[in-house]
Amino acid sequence: MPVADPDHRELLLASGAALLNLRLAIRARGVHPAVQLFPDSNQPDMLAIVRLQRRSPVGPVDRRLAKAIARRRTKPRPWAPTTVPLPLLNELRRAR
């Protein structure tokens, strides 16, 4: 994909979405996933390590989001060149 995604931005976004789905699926089964992002500087293509931790109660939000995983789709069109507002960016960072 050197022409369509030369900076690997789309790949990183898709990988992040897949990681979110994995975390949701694990939490929906009553287990807490411990996630370490970009764990090895010698392997820059390794997005994360996910380890199963303790049992944890499943909340209604996680249950609903996990049910939606099968209906999610990627966006086939280019992204708008707009900047994400700082309050939203901070909220997204806290959500990870």
Image: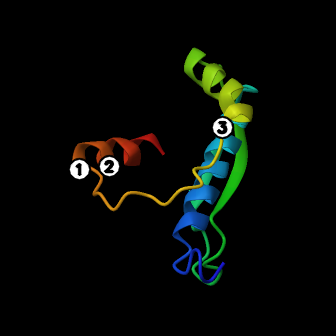
Q: Residues within 10 Å of mark 3 (few under 14, many from 20)?
A: few
Q: How many marks?
A: 3
Give residue 41's position: percent from left, percent from top. Answer: 57, 80
**Residue 18 visible within the image:** yes
Q: CA distance from mark 3 to mark 1?
A: 26 Å
**Residue 27 visible within the image:** no
Task: Residue lying at the far top in this picture: please name it.
Answer: 60
Looking at the image, residue 24 lies above or below residue 30 = below
**Residue that label 1 marks:** 86
Give residue 86's position: percent from left, percent from top. Answer: 23, 50
Mark in the foreground, 2 or 3: 3
**Residue that label 2 marks:** 89
**Most foreground residue, 66 or 8:** 8
Give residue 67's position: percent from left, percent from top. Answer: 70, 24
Q: Secondary structure at mark 2?
A: helix
Q: What residue appears at the point 59 percent right and 15 percent down from the top-left corner?
A: 60
Query: Of the residues under marks 3 and 1, which one precedes in the sequence?
Result: 3
Quadrant of image for the N terminus: bottom right
Which numbered marker is on residue 20?
A: none
Q: Residues within 10 Å of mark 1 (few under 14, many from 20)?
A: few
Q: Are marks 3 and 1 in contact (CB under 8 Å)?
A: no
Q: Are marks 1 and 2 in contact (CB under 8 Å)?
A: yes
Task: Residue lying at the far left in this picture: please name it.
Answer: 86
**Most foreground residue, 7 or 49:** 7
Q: Residues within 10 Å of mark 2 (few under 14, many from 20)?
A: few
Task: Residue lying at the far front in this picture: please name it.
Answer: 77
Q: Secondary structure at mark 1?
A: helix
Which numbered marker is on residue 72?
A: 3
Query: Of the residues under marks 2 and 3, which one precedes in the sequence?
Result: 3
Name the kind of residue labelled 2 in the image. Answer: Leu
**Most foreground residue, 96 or 4:** 4
Q: Are marks 2 and 3 in contact (CB under 8 Å)?
A: no
